[in-house]
Amino acid sequence: MKALLLVGGKGTRLRSVVSGAPKPMAQVGERSFLSLLVRQLRSQGIRRLVMCTGYLADQIEAEFQDGRDWDVAIEYSRELEAAGTAGAVRLAASHLNGVDEFFVLNGDSFIQMDFSAMLSFHRAHRASVTMAAVNVNDASRYGTLEIDESGRVNAFVEKTGISRPGTVNAGVYLFNRMILESIPEGCASLERDVFPSLLGDAIYALTHTGMFIDIGTPEDYALAQQLCTRLEQAAKS
């Protein structure tokens, strides 16, 4: 099993508090947020990683190198121009030879979860895509998911800006290799361009109850600092 980490974005909204570094390299406590994801994957036996880099890629590659210091093996797929979340996955296809299923993680969010349980769910439902979902009290800055009792995703609802509870995409996906064929050429988004087109093709969500945080805004980045110890513990569970 391999995991792709999407770490190429510029993180424009976070520039006021994290300047001169790619967003996943933002410090949470004494370590980078990205190291939290690497340690979470390693603790659950996923040690073959592909980092999809872009903005300030050199900083990430200098920090993690080939992964041996982290007890993982890391390859890099560097985009030379913005490709979007879907484009970054398509660009990494050459690193997925012989791989039928693979995880994809957003580099700016963390969800406490059991990756093996997600794999079992994915296979049991014969899903093309399984995404981690989480219930939040305030879904105003997220799009929400409509999920039936079996876990099938029936609709993606655009964010409304209205503060109310909802089930949201937690930024961890399990893909069948065939999904690579659904990604359009050029800059493309998983959330806007790929997932909606797959609604009739076995796209499922597994809802988790563990810690969830997205460091995409200064407010949530500050919260991550407050929760640093709990996040470290969650990455090991």
Image (cartoon, rainbow, N blue to C red):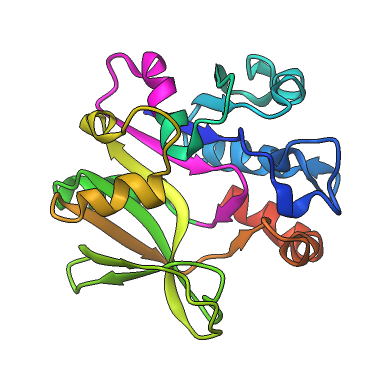
Q: Report the magenta residues as a range.
A: 90-112
Residue at image position (15%, 52%) is 125
Relative to residue 184, is residue 189 depicted above or below?
below
Asked if one can make out residue 14 in the rendered structure from this viewpoint, the answer is: yes
The quadrant the N terminus occupies is top left
Relative to residue 103, is residue 68 depicted above or below?
above
| Res. 40 image quadrant | top right
Residue at image position (72%, 43%) is 23
| Res. 145 image quadrant | bottom left
Give 13 or 40, whichever is nearer the viewer. 13
Asked if one can make out residue 116 in the rendered structure from this viewpoint, the answer is: no
Give the side of residue 197 with respect to residue 212, left or right. left
Residue at image position (16%, 51%) is 202
Q: Where is residue 8? Give x, y as percent.
A: 61, 33
Magenta stretch holds residue 126: no
Give 196 or 36, whichever is nearer the viewer. 196
Q: Where is residue 205? Give x, y as percent.
A: 30, 59
Q: Where is residue 64? Give x, y as percent.
A: 70, 23
Give the residue at the far front of this rendering: 186
- How many numbered circles are shown? 0
Magenta stretch holds residue 102: yes
Give 220 or 9, whichever is nearer the viewer. 9
Give the side of residue 114 with respect to residue 57, left or right. left
